[in-house]
Image (cartoon, rainbow, N blue to C red):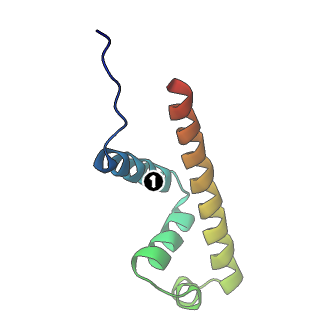
Amino acid sequence: MAAQRHPPQPEAADSLAFTALGDALKRLPLQQRQVVALYYLTDMSVADIARESGVAVGTVKARLASARHHIERELSEQTGAISDAR
C-alpha cells in the first residue's frame, strides 16, 4: 500500500514561511535591514527613521522598496523551488 502524502499542517507551513522570511532578511544589505527593522518592528515612521539615520526621507523609502523587492523575489524563488520539487 502506497504511503499517503498529507499537506503540511498550518503550523509547519507558518514555520517554513517564517524561516524563509528570516533568511531573506539576513541576506539584505545592512542599511536595508536596519530600515526594515525600524519601520516594521519598532513602528517608526519614514520621517523618524530618516531623521535618526541622518538621511533623506526619499533614501529611506528607496531602501524600504529595495528591501521589499529583494524579499519578495527570494520568497517567490523559494516557493518555486518547493513547488518544482513536488
Please tell me in which quadrant of the rendered image residue 5 appears.
top left
* Residue nearer the viewer, 63 or 31: 63
Residue 43, percent from left and from top: 44, 83
Please provide percent x and percent y for residue 9. 31, 43
> As drawn, is 36 to the left or to the right of 65?
left
Residue at screen point 51% across, 50% down: 27
Q: Which residue is mark 1?
A: 21
- Position of the N terminus by quadrant: top left
Q: Which residue sits at x=44%, y=47%?
A: 20
Residue positioned most to the front:
1
> To which quarter of the image does residue 16 belong?
top left
Question: In the rendered image, is residue 38 in sight?
Answer: yes
Q: Residue 31: give x, y in percent of width and height.
A: 55, 67
Name which residue type carries label 1. Answer: Leu
Query: Vertical placement of 86 versus 12: above or below?
Result: above
- The residue located at (51%, 25%) in the rendering is 85
